[in-house]
Image (tube, rainbow, N blue to C red):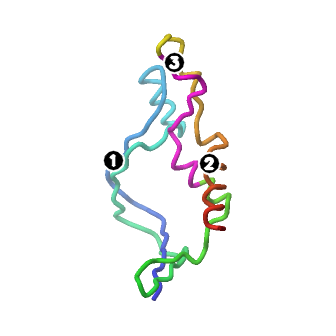
Amino acid sequence: MKRYLIETIVMEAYGTQTWYIDAESEKEAIDKFNDGEGDIYESNVEATRIGRPEISGEVSITDSSTPTINHFPTKDELVDKIAEALSCTYHCTRVWSAWQVGTMTVDDFSPVDDSDLPHEIADMILEMFNQ
């Protein structure tokens, strides 16, 4: 028995999406949104018309009904998925005591998805499965 993974293009949908956009004003936020900036915070969308389905992979189902994946992701695929999951999260580049002193600013944070962390996590995952 196999479980097939099917992808399709969403041609028509309805619902709502809420976005994160950092800006100094409402106008700047709208301008950034119109330029394609920002990240989805919450999505409640239902597809009402979809395109032609295409098989994108398959999963074998063992006797115990535990799925086993036939294709283990490459390091680059893992890094991309981890970075995507960590988008909108930030590293603090200062010691936490800077909060108490009042010298911490937004410039003291950097995006996690642009750092080495997704690569380090992918390495740990691959090492765990290669043992």
Q: Earlier in the sequence, mark 3 or mark 1?
A: 1
**Where 108 falls versus 101 (above or below)?**
below
Q: What amino acid type is highlighted by mark number 3?
A: Ser
Residue at 33% from the left image edge and 54% from the top image edge: 14
Instruction: Write the start and end of the magenta stretch as one range.
Output: 81-99
Residue at 64% from the left image edge and 62% from the top image edge: 126
Residue at 51% from the left image edge and 78% from the top image edge: 59
Q: Are marks 3 and 2 in contact (CB under 8 Å)?
A: no
Q: In terms of secondary structure, where does tag 1 sit? A: strand
Question: Which numbered marker is on residue 16?
Answer: 1
Residue at 41% from the left image edge and 24% from the top image edge: 26
What residue did someone put label 2 on?
118
Which of the pair 32/65 is nearer the observer? 65
Residue farthest toward the front in the current orientation of the protein: 131
**Is 111 situated left or right of 51 in this image?**
right
The x and y percentages for residue 47 are: 36, 62
**Where 18 falls versus 65 (above or below)?**
above
What residue did someone put label 3 on?
97
How many residues crowd around disc 3 within 10 Å: few (fewer than 14), some, or many (20 or more)?
few
**Is 72 situated left or right of 32 in this image?**
right
How many residues crowd around disc 1 within 10 Å: few (fewer than 14), some, or many (20 or more)?
few
Magenta stretch contains residue 98:
yes
